[in-house]
Image (cartoon, rainbow, N blue to C red):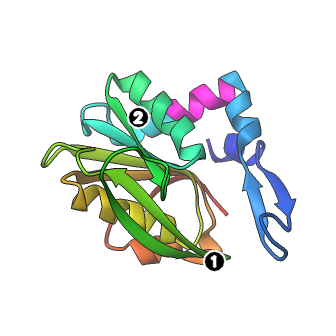
Amino acid sequence: MAAGVASHVLDVPDFPEPGVTFKDLTPLFADPDGFRHVIDAVVEHHGSDSFDVVAGIEARGFVIAAAVAYATGTGVVPVRKAGKLPRRTVSASYTLEYGTATLEVHEDAFHRGERVLVVDDVLATGGTAEATLQLVERAGGRVAGFSVLLELGFLQGRQRLAPRQVHALLTV
């Protein structure tokens, strides 16, 4: 699985700002067999009965979350950038490798104690993931797992999320 993910990653230098190399996984999303295999791998790792809903982190996490939710017959909740959701929200601010940002979910996004699988495309420093896991819990959910397609291990995001388990299909 790792080789399949690796073969679809495109490095985009100096995006979104100089000195940052963006890991673009959209070629993987466009490959029907490759995309099917990564979604199946995420579902297989967690088990389709280990979560009630899937939360996807803006924006590429939406693609993964929707596919995992469809494959397992569960619902999907978008974790959005600040100001994008129309109703009352819970928010968390965090530091990126190149700035700061705020994420939000609707206050009623999760039923109390609902098991939430959180997914995203890339784990870098862990700030986005950490904020999302906190949002899930503050909104009443219980984090059942966290999966990414690609982990940038040299940025040590996994350590920031400890003791939570991180599932990555490829770590570089």
Percent coordinates x, y for residue 141 in the rendering: 21, 51
Percent coordinates x, y for residue 140 in the rendering: 18, 53
Residue 127 shows in this picture: yes
What is the number of the mark on residue 60? none
Q: Dividing the picture into quarters, in which one does residue 17 lie? A: bottom right
Nearer the viewer's eye, disc 2 or disc 1? 1
Mark toward the start of the polypeptide (2 vs 1)? 2
Write the residue at 46% across / 37% down: 65
Question: In the rendered image, which quarter contains the C terminus?
Answer: bottom right
Q: Which residue is mark 1?
A: 99
- Looking at the image, the residue that sits furthest to the left is 112
Asked whether residue 76 is drawn in magenta, I would say: no
Q: Which residue is mark 2?
A: 44
* Cβ atoms at labels 2 and 1 below 8 Å apart: no
Write the residue at 30% across / 51% down: 88
Seen from the viewer's position, the closer of residues 92 and 74 is 92
Write the residue at 61% across / 41% down: 1
Circle 1 Cα neighbour tier, 10 Å, few/some/many (<14 / 14–19 / ≥20): few
> Does 126 sit left or right of 170 as displayed?
left
Seen from the viewer's position, the closer of residues 67 and 163 is 67
> Does 78 sit left or right of 137 as displayed?
right
Q: The residue under label 2 is which amino acid type?
A: Glu
Percent coordinates x, y for residue 76 in the rendering: 38, 34
Q: The residue under label 1 is which amino acid type?
A: Gly
Write the residue at 76% across / 48% down: 9
Percent coordinates x, y for residue 24 in the rendering: 75, 50
Circle 2 Cα neighbour tier, 10 Å, few/some/many (<14 / 14–19 / ≥20): few
Which segment did they paint magenta?
33-40
